[in-house]
Amino acid sequence: MMAAVEMIEIRRGAFVESVHRGHAVICDASGDIVAAWGDPEKVILPRSSAKMIQALPLVESGAADAAGLTSEQLALACASHNGAAIHTGRVARWLGDLGLAEGDLRCGAQIPDDPEASAELIRSAGAPCQLHNNCSGKHAGFLTLSRHLGAGPEYVAPDHPVQRAIRAAWEEVTQETSPGFAIDGCSAPNFASSLHGMARAMAGFATARAGNGPRQDAQARLVAAMMAHPDLVAGEGRACTDLMRALGGAGAVKTGAEACFVAILPGLGLGVALKIEDGSFRASNAAIAAILVQLGLLDADHPAALRHMTPRILNRRGVDTGQLRPVPGVFGL
Amino acid sequence: MMAAVEMIEIRRGAFVESVHRGHAVICDASGDIVAAWGDPEKVILPRSSAKMIQALPLVESGAADAAGLTSEQLALACASHNGAAIHTGRVARWLGDLGLAEGDLRCGAQIPDDPEASAELIRSAGAPCQLHNNCSGKHAGFLTLSRHLGAGPEYVAPDHPVQRAIRAAWEEVTQETSPGFAIDGCSAPNFASSLHGMARAMAGFATARAGNGPRQDAQARLVAAMMAHPDLVAGEGRACTDLMRALGGAGAVKTGAEACFVAILPGLGLGVALKIEDGSFRASNAAIAAILVQLGLLDADHPAALRHMTPRILNRRGVDTGQLRPVPGVFGL
């Protein structure tokens, strides 16, 4: 097993203060590795970086069309959103359209990351609900599929038809038998996969074209939905939103807990998957941005790159005390 | 240079999801290394884990006694506090006693980590001020010393008499010439040191006894103040507070940004210094707790150990999905 590579460093004054190591793979739809850092066969829990895989049965089954889901709703099904009003309002209406309500969700309540939504809860002495959970759109998708299948309400149980369908799709697109699953923060099963498998799956999404059967139809629609609604996939200031806006339709990217990140790059026909071994978002954000820069899809001077790849570290009086940046040379930068 | 050691892992289901590497040293007052992990000569920026060193000139100079500082104020001078009312009220009164005000601080404003203080600011549409800065007690100490020395108001400038006195004390207790400094989050200089030097300095604090001259008098008073007021050094739920309460006078511990941690252990005559290479607090909290358990000062079943060393990871519906824990065997656990 190849060791994790030092990818991202934090400099303060003349000193390297901290460093983040990780693994990453870029591959094409045939599964050939175009570039790799560390161990491409590293087994990870992809967490929310796999949401577009978890959304496949929703679309492929016909459930999405039967429910009249829009591109916005497909983007929310793939989202780890901030719980802002633009997210929670849409998920609430979606549930209402299904004849369901917040209590039918099984994701649990979460304090929203969106500062305004969070402050409003404090001002109104309100409590966060399941709509605020960053996965509420994914769960609305699960409920949509569950109703279409005529299955029961406990849709996050690993043997529920929704999760069985997801596991089948997951193993097909990664082209791997998953060694097992763990339970995610939102209570859904999350299937262990190699980074190579995840990158291969993302390359499959990147090369999917409408008219080539239900799988590719679904993949192409989900990627288009993510790219069309970067604000629904994450939220203001978040790496997914900023980077997809910067890519301007050249790719979809998705973060996952414990510092997973994937990219779907249709123009290049490539998929990317990475994992920072210590689970730090600041490093996974920087690493995916660095890979996009290396691939020529993002300018190193673009505000999204300056914000997530090479942010200056300002202290509490605004003094520039250091910088987070890719370890020189690692990403060809 | 010896490589960082895998110290802390995050398990989810049957999988090791993330891992944190670090360096640590335990040594005695003569500087002999009792135990080490990774590279004991690793140069770090100790950040707030060095606050008891930064408080030495305040006490040694006679400034603390001239201003009538209490044990509570000495604890606050060593604190990275949560900006709760128990902290901000005391620092405000301290400044008032000096004939100074919040605007004389040079630490910058910070949103308090204390949930109630933070919520109250939102409810009252207020803005955080410099009193809320986790370092405001340290800065009140700087101002106290600056007034005693008759020095100017820009007390965080590296060539200010306050900072020159700190550098001299710092190099004396670490028994090293610092290779330089960087600017901390609160704008004060922070002097680079080896972990070995930091552990040696902490062992010096651990073995200091009143009546052995101004240096040891100051060291003993600061350690006693930290141990007497664990709630002032950090805040409710924080590792420093919980672990010092658990130690019940058997030691003082102090965290620092980017995952530094030190321990002063008077009963054993030992000092500890550690740094997680990726800067994650969850790992530095767990690692210092594991070392305290290994040294026989903390029971592995104590609530503070369960909270910081081996916390279960509950998801948003309260489902037990995994655990953070020391890598088996690394700390003799």
Image (tube, coloured by chain):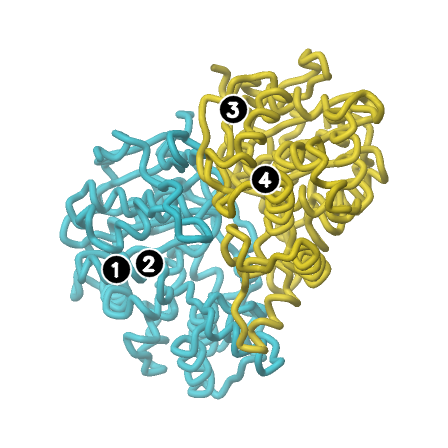
Chain colours: A yellow, B cyan
Asked if the residue at tag 4 contacts the one at tag 3, i.e. Cβ–Cβ closer than 8 Å, the answer is no
- Distance (Cα) linking label 3 and label 1: 35 Å
> Residue beneath label 3, please?
A4
Asked if the residue at tag 4 contacts the one at tag 1, i.e. Cβ–Cβ closer than 8 Å, the answer is no
Question: Which residue lies at the image location 70% right of the left edge and 53% below the top edge?
Answer: A235
Can residue A261 be seen here? yes
Mark number for residue A48?
4
The subunit letter for the residue under badge 2 reads B
Amino acid tagged 1: Met
Mark number for residue B240?
2
In the image, is A188 to the left or to the right of B61? right
- Distance (Cα) linking label 3 and label 4: 22 Å
- Distance (Cα) linking label 1 and label 2: 6 Å
In the image, is B206 to the left or to the right of A138? left
Q: Element type at marker 3?
A: loop
Amino acid tagged 3: Ala
Residue B46 % position (x, y): 43, 49
Q: Is residue B295 above or below residue B209?
A: above
Q: In which image quadrant can residue A167 be found?
A: top right
